[in-house]
Every structure is written in structure tokens, then in C-alpha cells.
Amino acid sequence: MKHPYGYRWHWLYALVVTLMTALATFSAHAAVTAGPGAWSSQQTWAADTVNGGNLTGYFYWPASQPTTPNGKRALVLVLHGCLQTASGDVIDNANGAGFNWKTIAEQYGAVILAPNATGNVYSNHCWDYANTSPSRTSGHVGVLLDLVNRFVTNSQYAIDPNQVYVAGLSSGGGMTMVLGCIAPDIFAGIGINAGPPPGTTTSQIGYVPSGYTATTAANNCKAWAGSNASSFNTQIAGAVWGTSDYTVAQAYGPMDTAAFRLIYGGTFTKGATVSISGGGTNTPYTDSNGKLRTHEISVSGMAHAWPAGTGGDNTNYVDATHINYPAFVMDYWVKNNLRAGSGPVQSGSTPTGLTVTGTTTTSVSLSWNAVTNATSYNVYRNGSKVGSSTSTTYTDSGLIAGTSYSYTVTEIDPTAGESAQSSAVSAKTQSSFACTATTASNYAHVQAGRAHDSGGIAYANGSNQSMGLDNVFYTTTLAQTAAGYYVIGNCP
């Protein structure tokens, strides 16, 4: 005899199994699959019928989960310059350094693509940035867009199509701008490193041709975008170049970003130029809605190279002695993305009492008031996160002597999440120059090079302060406060 409730229990059992299966399926899709945390072996992706050969290269699939605001994985296409390769320069498998993208990939949980330029364009393994009629379906643009699509449409990588970015050096920088122009619907953010703008030829890389302006570049760019031009409304861009770059004209950097501001339309406000650790300065531009849309980075003393920063290579047009551009540009893209949106809004309590407690030539020490329930705090320098602390103090190191920085701090609450940033404080590192004072006759000061004579009067070098007659009878104390700079009086 069957149990009178047998059918009911069978139905309940089936329901439980169904719910558990659905929950497991949901969890599998909710958690982004982690990768091996290593560069792949060399891949072959597509044939290039225009330039010849196949598009080959490497990709990095991080072992970490995404840390973007919406919790989805970003994709970055990185393009080498002429005379470079993906294997030897971008990823540098032998040393694991290269352009220094590996650390950033893990920090943000982003997939990185590093392709090799197909063919032998311009006889130097370049990208075909100077093509006056680029196509979304052929040539370098065609194979690169196909590559991006392969990863975005492959569910195992869980790429957010609203977080696809591109950056490159030299011809790769020029191709970065080409891709940002012809496919603004694909690329939410671009980073141009020493890249000539659209419409310039390979013979014009070292100078801006007569009559060529940001408007010229903007018009070429908009023409290539065609029906996708509306996507410029939600794109952001930036450029970086070295002040000792004598290969690609330095004027192309600000011209590139000026062109994008013309393309984006409306009015823009130029922000304050701030220092970046490693010898660079950044100038931001916000649109009429207060959104940061472009930035310009000038790297003091850097030649024609990819600024990899500490941990990257330092050879063959890769520079490890200046700024870490991957860290900067990824932070810029993620924070200012206009397409991706964000996850649930959570906000802890904003810290108060942020104070500078000390400075050295290379560091700034900070303190702030404790926040109830905070488990840690994040510290931001010039808008970019530089570290975290489980206490209410932090020392930011590796800075530039005699340079001003702006700091804010947030708190991390295990239930409420990260708070808004605190009110900012400014700090200036100490000068690396040790002041010395010398008391001597005006004549002796002039003879020693601390002062100079003009019409029989001695003047302090640098400050040009009048010291009186240039003879052995007038005595003055001069303080050297900087190299070649003297003021009357003792050291402050």
C-alpha cells in the first residue's frame, strides 16, 4: 500500500532539487571565472589578407576577480611600437616584466591582449596607423577588432563590452587613436602614447605639418566613425609623451586630446596640473557635466618609450625609470568610465580630520580620525589610490622632492563598503637642497660666483637682490636656498 502522502513528498523533493540546481547555475554565472594568472602561449587568431600573415600574440587571464565598480571584467588591448614585438617587449615572457601590465591585470581582474603587428608595415614591424582609408573589416583595424570580438563574445572570459580599452606606443599609439576613432562603439577609453594623429604620414612623425591642427585630426576621426559617431558621447581619452622624445613630435600629444575634446563637443574646463610619481605631470579636462573626459601627461626627461614604471623593462623603447603608465591609465579608465555603470551603491562614513603630520624629501605622512566599524582605510594621492592602512596613519613614499601633492582618504566598512573620499589636504615634500649661508665681502661673493657685478653694484645670483657696492669694504651674508639661487640673510 502506498503512503497517502507519497506523491506530495515526491513533488517536494523534485522542487528542492530544481531550486538547488537553479541556485548552482546562478552561482556559476554570478562568479566570474578566474584564469591561470599567467601570459598564454603564442596564439594565432586571424589571417590578414591585406598585410600578409596571421595575427598572433598573447593574452593574460588574471587569477583575481574583477575590482571594477560593477564587478565585471575589463579588457585592455595593448599595441607595441615599431621595432618591437609582443613577446619581447609588451609581455617579455623571459622576465615577466615588459610593459608592466601583469600587476595591473591582477589588481583590477582585467584581461590583457598583446598582439603582434601583422606583415612588415613601414619595414619596421609597425601598425598601419597612417592608412588614410582604414576599414573595420580588413587590414590591421579589421584583425584587431576581430580579436577584441573573439574575447568579448567568449563567455568563459566574462568580458564587459562596456569596459573595453586600448593603449599603445608610437605606431601603436597612432593605431590606438585610429581604433578610438573608427570604433568608438567598441572602445570606452583610449590611451595614446607618443602617437601621431589621423591624416599624418610616416615622414611627418617628427614634426607637425603646416596647416595641420587639432581640428584636422577631429574631422578625420569623425569621418571614420560614420554612423557610430554618437558613441563619442560616452568615450574618454588620454595622451602621454616624454619631454625628451625626439622621435615623435611632442606637440602631437596635446593635439590628440584637443582633437577628442572637439569630437566630444561642448565646453571643457582645464584642471590644475598635478605631479605624478616618477617625474610626470598630468593635466585633466572636464566637460560641462563635470565628467573627466581627457588627460595629458608630460613625462619629464623621458625619451621615446613606453613608461612602464618600476617592475617593467628598461630597454628597447620601454622605460622603467619614470611613471607607471599602466597603473595610471587603468585607474583613469575604471574611475571615469561613462558606460559601465556600477553595482549596488554603498557608502560608509567619510573620515574627518585628515592632517599632514610630516614630510621628507621623498615622503608625506598623514593621520586622520578613526571611523566606527572601519576595518581599513584607502589613501588617494591626486585622485588615484596609492595604498591602504588598518590604522589611522599612512606614509606615502617614493615621491619627488620639492613637489606638491593632494591627498584624500576613505574608510572601508565590512557591511557598508567604501565611503566617499574625505576633504583633501595638500602637502609639499621637502627640497633636496641643503641651504648654506656665507658671510663675506661683496667682492668675494662676486669672485666666488654667488653674486654678479652690474655697474659697480653687487647683486645676489638668482634673487638679483642688491647687496651694495662691489668692493672689499661691504660685507653681506648670502644664503643659498637652491642650486644657483642666493638670497640676502641667513638660511630660513
Image: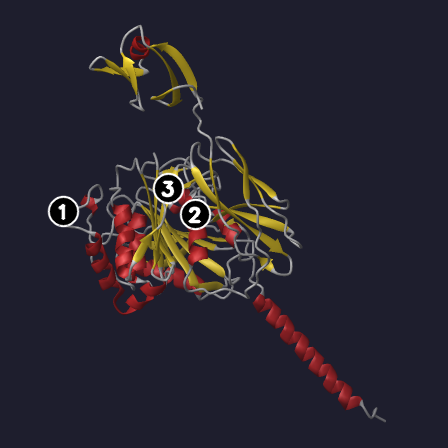
Separation (CA) of disc 1 from disc 3: 28 Å
The amino acid marked with disc number 1 is Ser
**Within 10 angstroms of label 1, few (less than 14), some, or many (20 or more) residues?**
few
Name above or below for residue 256 compared with residue 20: above
The residue located at (20%, 53%) in the rendering is 199
The amino acid marked with disc number 2 is Phe
Residue with the mark numbered 1: 210
Q: Position of residue 192 (x, y in %)?
A: 33, 50
Give whichever of discs 1 and 3 has the lower sequence position: 1
Q: Determine whether, in the image, residue 134 is placed left or right of residue 323.
A: left
Q: Position of residue 137 (x, y in %)?
A: 29, 64
Name above or below for residue 273 compared with residue 462: below
Image quarter where the C terminus lies is top left
Q: Position of residue 441 (x, y in %)?
A: 34, 9
Of all residues, the one furthest to the left in this rendering is 210
Give whichever of discs 2 and 1 has the lower sequence position: 1
Question: Is disc 2 in contact with disc 3, using a CB cutoff of under 8 Å?
Answer: no
Instruction: Please tell me which residue lies in front, 355 or 144.
Output: 355
Mark 1 or 3, which is nearer the eye?
3
**Within 10 angstroms of label 3, few (less than 14), some, or many (20 or more) residues?**
some
Residue with the mark numbered 2: 328
Can the viewer see residue 97? yes
> What numbered label is drawn on residue 281?
3
Can the viewer see residue 313? no
The amino acid marked with disc number 3 is Thr
